[in-house]
Each structure stands twice: as structure tokens, then as C-alpha cells.
Image: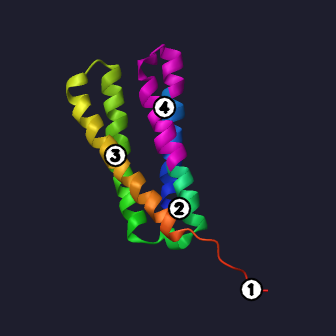
Amino acid sequence: MGIKFIKVSVIYFLIGISLGIYMGFADKFQFTSAHTHINLLGWVSLAISGVIYHLFPYAGENTLAKVHFWLMMIGVPLLTFAMILFGLGEIGIGGPMSGIGGILILIGVVLFVFNVLKNVQVKATES
């Protein structure tokens, strides 16, 4: 799962950087919230999760990691798209979409925390 998280994170990195450049050129800073969510949740959080799962394969090769992945794959786009809608002044559908995306992300993060606390351990080396 670690490699999947890392590969998806670099796609979000490209999207986040592209959106930031667009915002700067077009003077459309109402999308700052979407830009921030793409970069922090999509790029940084997923990349760090991927590195942890790669370094600690037992944590990355279980059901918790798989569910974490899919909750983030659904939650991050929902929340990010809601932020774009907010920037366009479309609060009506953005509110519920933001709530659903945020809850999915929260559940994914709780599973990640549980997984790390349970399955990330230092192994004693033999002399």
C-alpha cells in the first residue's frame, strides 16, 4: 500500500502546484482553501502515509491500510471539490459534500493512527 499512497500523492502534488500557478496568473485566490487541501491532504499526508507504510510493511499490508487508502481516495476529492464550490460561491451543495469528505478523511486518519500505533514497531536486532 505504501507505493500506492506515494504514487497518488505525486498526482496531487502536480494538481496542487498547477492550481497554485493558475491562481497566481488568473488572480483567483478564492481557491486558496482548495489549493491548501490538495497540497496538505493529497500531497503531504498521503506521501507521509506511504513512506510509513513502505518502511513498516506489516502496517502497510493489512486491511486497515487498504481501508485508509480508499477512504482518502474518496474523501480528499470530495472535500477539495467542495472547497472549489465554496470559492465559486456555491455553498448549497458544497456544505454536505465537505461534510461527507471530511468525515471520510477523519475515519481514514483514525484508522491510520490505530494502524501505526498497533503495527509500527522497532524490531530488536540480533547481535
Quarter of the figure with the C terminus: bottom right
Residue mark closest to the camera, 4 vs 1: 1
Q: Amino acid at mark 1?
A: Glu
Mark closest to the chain's N terminus, 2 or 3: 2
Q: CA distance from mark 2 to mark 3?
A: 19 Å
Within the image, what quadrant is residue 111 found in? bottom left
Give above or below for 118 relative to 79.
below
Q: Please name the residue shown 53% across and 16% down the image.
A: 25
Q: CA distance from mark 4 to mark 1?
A: 45 Å
Q: Are marks 2 and 3 in contact (CB under 8 Å)?
A: no
Q: Which mark is residue 36?
A: 4
Look at the magenta stretch and give its main secondary structure: helix
* Residue with the mark numbered 3: 75
Q: Secondary structure at mark 4?
A: helix
Q: Amino acid at mark 2?
A: Ile
Within the image, what quadrant is residue 108 found in? bottom left
Q: CA distance from mark 1 to mark 3?
A: 43 Å
Q: Are marks 3 and 4 in contact (CB under 8 Å)?
A: no
* Residue with the mark numbered 1: 126
* Residue with the mark numbered 2: 3
Mark closest to the chain's N terminus, 1 or 2: 2
Residue mark closest to the camera, 2 vs 3: 3
Magenta residue check for 89: no
Mark closest to the chain's N terminus, 3 or 4: 4
Q: Are marks 1 and 2 in contact (CB under 8 Å)?
A: no
- Magenta range is 20-45
Q: Secondary structure at mark 3?
A: helix
Mark closest to the chain's N terminus, 1 or 3: 3
Q: CA distance from mark 2 to mark 4?
A: 23 Å
Q: From the viewer's perspective, tell me whether residue 54 is left or right of residue 28.
A: right
